[in-house]
């Protein structure tokens, strides 16, 4: 029903509840302005308007929390929107949605501020991911690079989101200044992968309630170019003549200690096992009576346990070595510390000095593994058995999911043949491939 006079507080307070809700409209000053009274006596201001040919009602506020003057002001604002061709109800819903979205964004920003992970947490998360994917060798390399090169520039407590391309350039510049350009490429790839992991972690819906988020908006490594554009693929392998020369020359060479020489010989005698796995091997992994070297999964690069049959040449090296280091934990203990293995870096340095001083064409410890694999092929051993001797992860479906046979007999026969081959090469005798012997 219409009010004959402009609304006053006295009039509004005098409105009494009835058996059903009713509305009182003011048709004098503000068209469409009114009050609705509920059966309980609650009084609510409203504005009636027509939009798209339909009458609509918009609540303006409850009286007396919303005063008459405030309700009238809101009414006039609504009328202005209608005159501009807007639907006040839709506009109110839009503004409410914007406020809700802004509030949610504010909460996210506050949560990111409170929970944004540090550089240390980012790398621990990435290294943990590598370990969970059975990439323990890669995890070790990332940790070493983090501790040696990343922490030289970045505070471990620094927020990961605050790392800039300038920080990345400084890290890589320090590495290149010491002449290690290939290592700079490696560290760049580790950094790229770590920040990529952090971004994926934040964007994963399952991690919305995670204890740590990183707040990364972009990968700071993305636009940093590789230091060396094209790295030379490792292709060096020692010929039979070089292999014999290297083995025999170690007896006369004075620039390398006995343990280092023996470690290189054991790498070759065991068919090119990884240098790190050799020099960090504890005596407890060797069963001399059964002629086996059994590496547990936590010691191998791919996280798979590995059994290496021991041929006569390898056993003779171990027998000599036991007389010297048998009371130590490791075959090749660190100088002055029987409870720690020989440092891996010392092997590369020793081999580099050997090549420089003897004029031998330069090669690396890893090239010995390639040499063994290549000469084993020359001997006539199949690629499959060579891969199994080197503990390479076979990727075909059958090998990955169904084949649980350990191939110990085949590996033993292959390692025996390799020992005889290597002994003949060292002695300078004629060597025939397995296929030729069987003719």
Image: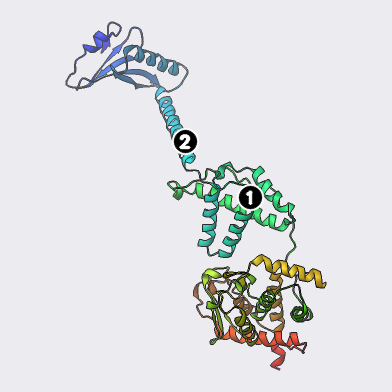
Q: Going by the picture, which residue comes out furthest to the left? A: 19
Residue 313, given in percent of the width and then of the height, sits at 65, 85
Q: Are marks 2 and 1 in contact (CB under 8 Å)?
A: no
Residue 105, label in figure: 2
What secondary structure is found at the residue carrying circle 1?
loop
Tell me which label, 2 or 1, sits earlier in the chain: 2
Residue placed farthest to the front in the image? 336
Give the labeled residue for mark 1: 152
Disc 1: CA contacts within 10 A as few (<14), some (14-19) or many (>=20): few
Numbered badge on residue 236: none
Rendered view: 428 above or below 222: below
Q: Nearer the viewer, residue 13 or 236?
A: 236
> Residue 39 location in percent, x, y?
19, 22
In this rendering, is residue 335 above or below 378?
A: above
SS for callout 2: helix
For the image, the number of numbered tags is 2
Q: Quadrant of residue 431?
A: bottom right
Q: Is residue 135 above or below residue 292?
A: above
Q: Quadrant of the N terminus?
A: top left
Q: How far apart are marks 2 and 1 (CA)?
A: 35 Å
Coordinates of residue 324 in the picture (x, y in percent): 62, 80
Question: Which one is nearer the viewer's eye here, 158 or 346?
Answer: 346
Query: Along the horizontal axis of the image, is 90 left or right of 400?
Result: left
Q: Where is residue 366 in the image (x, y as percent from the top left)?
A: 69, 70
In this rendering, position of residue 92 left or right of residue 305: left
Circle 2 crowding by C-alpha within 10 Å: few under 14, some 14–19, many from 20: few
Q: In this view, does 231 lie to the left or right of 204?
A: right
Residue shown at 71%/58% (left/top)? 182
Mark 2 or mark 1, whichever is nearer to me: 1
């Amino acid at each position: 029903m219409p009010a004959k006079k402009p609304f006053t507080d006295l009039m509004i307070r005098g409105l009494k509840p009835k058996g059903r809700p009713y509305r009182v409209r003011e048709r004098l000053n503000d068209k469409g302005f009114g009050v609705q009274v509920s059966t309980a006596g609650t009084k609510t201001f409203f504005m009636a308007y027509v939009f798209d040919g339909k009458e609509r009602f918009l609540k303006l506020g409850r009286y007396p929390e919303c005063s008459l003057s405030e309700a009238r002001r809101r009414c006039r604002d609504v009328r202005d929107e209608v005159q501009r061709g807007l639907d006040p109800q839709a506009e109110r819903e839009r503004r409410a949605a914007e406020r809700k979205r802004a509030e949610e964004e504010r909460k996210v920003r506050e949560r990111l501020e409170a929970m944004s992970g540090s550089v240390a947490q980012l790398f621990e998360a990435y290294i943990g991911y590598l370990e969970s994917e059975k990439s323990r060798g890669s995890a070790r390399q990332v940790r070493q690079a983090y501790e040696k090169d990343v922490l030289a520039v970045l505070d471990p407590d620094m927020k990961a989101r605050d790392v800039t391309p300038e920080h990345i350039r400084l890290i890589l510049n320090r590495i290149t200044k010491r002449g290690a350009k290939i290592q700079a490429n490696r560290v760049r790839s580790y950094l790229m992968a770590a920040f990529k992991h952090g971004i994926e972690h934040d964007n994963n819906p399952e991690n919305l309630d995670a204890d740590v988020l990183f707040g990364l908006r972009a990968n700071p490594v993305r636009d940093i170019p590789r230091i060396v554009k094209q790295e030379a693929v490792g292709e060096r392998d020692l010929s039979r003549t070089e292999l014999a020369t290297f083995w025999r020359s170690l007896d006369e060479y004075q620039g390398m200690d006995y343990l280092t020489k023996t470690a290189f010989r054991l790498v070759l005698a065991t068919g090119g096992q990884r240098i790190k796995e050799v020099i960090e091997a504890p005596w407890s992994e060797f069963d001399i009576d059964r002629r086996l070297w059994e590496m547990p999964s936590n010691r191998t690069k791919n996280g798979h346990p590995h059994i290496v049959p021991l041929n006569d040449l390898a056993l003779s090296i171990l027998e000599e070595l036991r007389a010297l280091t048998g009371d130590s934990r490791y075959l090749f203990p660190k100088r002055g510390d029987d409870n720690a293995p020989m440092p891996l870096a010392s092997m590369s340095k020793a081999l580099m000095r050997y090549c420089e001083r003897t004029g031998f064409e330069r090669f690396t410890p890893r090239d010995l593994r390639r040499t063994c694999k290549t000469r084993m092929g020359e001997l006539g051993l199949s690629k499959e058995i060579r891969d199994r001797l080197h503990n390479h992860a076979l990727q075909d479906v059958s090998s990955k999911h169904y084949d649980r046979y350990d191939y110990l007999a085949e590996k033993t026969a292959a390692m025996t043949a390799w020992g005889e081959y290597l002994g003949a090469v060292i002695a300078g005798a004629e060597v025939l491939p397995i296929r030729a012997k069987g003719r």
